[in-house]
Image (tube, grey):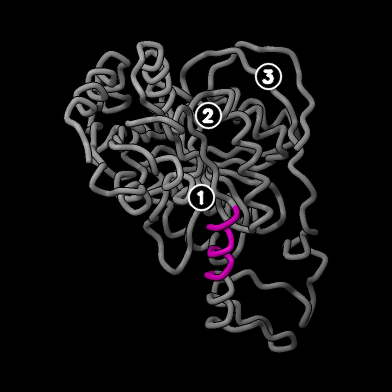
Amino acid sequence: MTAETTGLRLMEGAAAIGESAILAGCRFFAGYPMSPFTALLEHMSKALPAAGGVCINAESEIEGVNMALGAGATGARAATGSCGQGIALMQEAIAEAALNETPMVVFNMARNQQDYFQATRGGGWGDYRTITLAPKDIPEAVEHTQLLFHLAELHRGPTILYGDPLLAQTRVGVHLRRIEFGELPPREWALDGTTGGSGHSRQVWTWAMGKATDPGPGPDRHWRDVAAKFDRIAETEQRSESGYVEDADTVVVSFGSAAKFVEYVVEELRAEGHRIGWFRPITLWPFPGPALAAATRGARRVLVFELNAGQMLDDVRQYAHDRSAIRFIGGVSIHESGLAYGPLLDAPRIRERILAAAAEGGR
């Protein structure tokens, strides 16, 4: 991976993510305004045409995602997005993109952390998954944006950035840069208009029947090939990071913006002599299960902090070294507006919950 870095710029997160998408080669963007995604759509409506691209304010989320699907099928780097409520309407098209093997990026600027199941389990049809990255802050979101365009094309399917109000609306200093992640295969699959004519046009469709003069593999073979591809992705694209787990009695697992708060609290507790560590899945799918098992091998307690009723908790239960050591210390916490996090995303409250759970003992 190489990068060419520009000077530090103070930017709102949505603008920085949009600029990073353009640097990654995004030239088509479509979406319907829903806060906090609206800020990203507004920025792309100004910046993308200036870069030679097209941005469409669609009449619905369903129109927006299908526009992106069509643009992606031509080989263009395309993207769409919403918050979780709008992405719920996109699920059929996201599944079609996965089963069609059509690259595109979906930006979920979520209102909270209650879209984990949506991102990792999906609501479409068929045997498909979506690579999902959950950045903890805006500089990481800028990098993840470009990585997701690369992974979408490398593996030929939709990828998801799991954002939130903090990533969309906070202003920080960022270095915008074009990042190169390596060579990609030629876009022989793209519908670029050069293969028209009787018997020669390409067909992009999940049934993969092909044309009479060039029969495709048929639905059974195609779907088995797609399922095998996702099995390979599950092994090769796991990403995570951890801190202080080597001697930790307690390991706190969290993702996205919440993980930034957890890391801060753990740093404080470490300075006070507490043997506490942290673990963060960067890819929500594929979930980094083996890394979590290794990080929790010596822990007496595994605490799960997320701002929902316990969704990532299911994956932690599946992979943590000792299921009996797991305690849930998160919970639903939403601002009265319904558009942002509630009071639980607060360092002193997280500290209280970690210390209370640590005092309960373990195995």
Q: Residue at x 55, y 13 (%)?
A: 172
Position in image of residue 101 (x %, y %): 61, 63
For marks 2 and 1, give the CA distance: 15 Å
Q: Which residue is mark 2?
A: 40
Q: Secondary structure at mark 3?
A: strand
Q: Note whether 321 is above or below 56 in the view shown.
A: below
Q: Secondary structure at mark 2?
A: helix
Residue 235 at least partly seen: yes
Nearest to the eye among marks 3 and 2: give it: 3
Give the side of residue 101 with respect to residue 242, left or right. Answer: right
294, 314: nearer the viewer: 294
Query: The disc labelled 3 sits on which kind of residue?
Result: His
Q: Which residue is mark 3?
A: 175
Q: Tell me where the magenta segment starts and ends, as one range.
A: 227-236
The answer to which quarter of the image holds residue 345 is: top left
Q: Residue furthest right?
A: 194
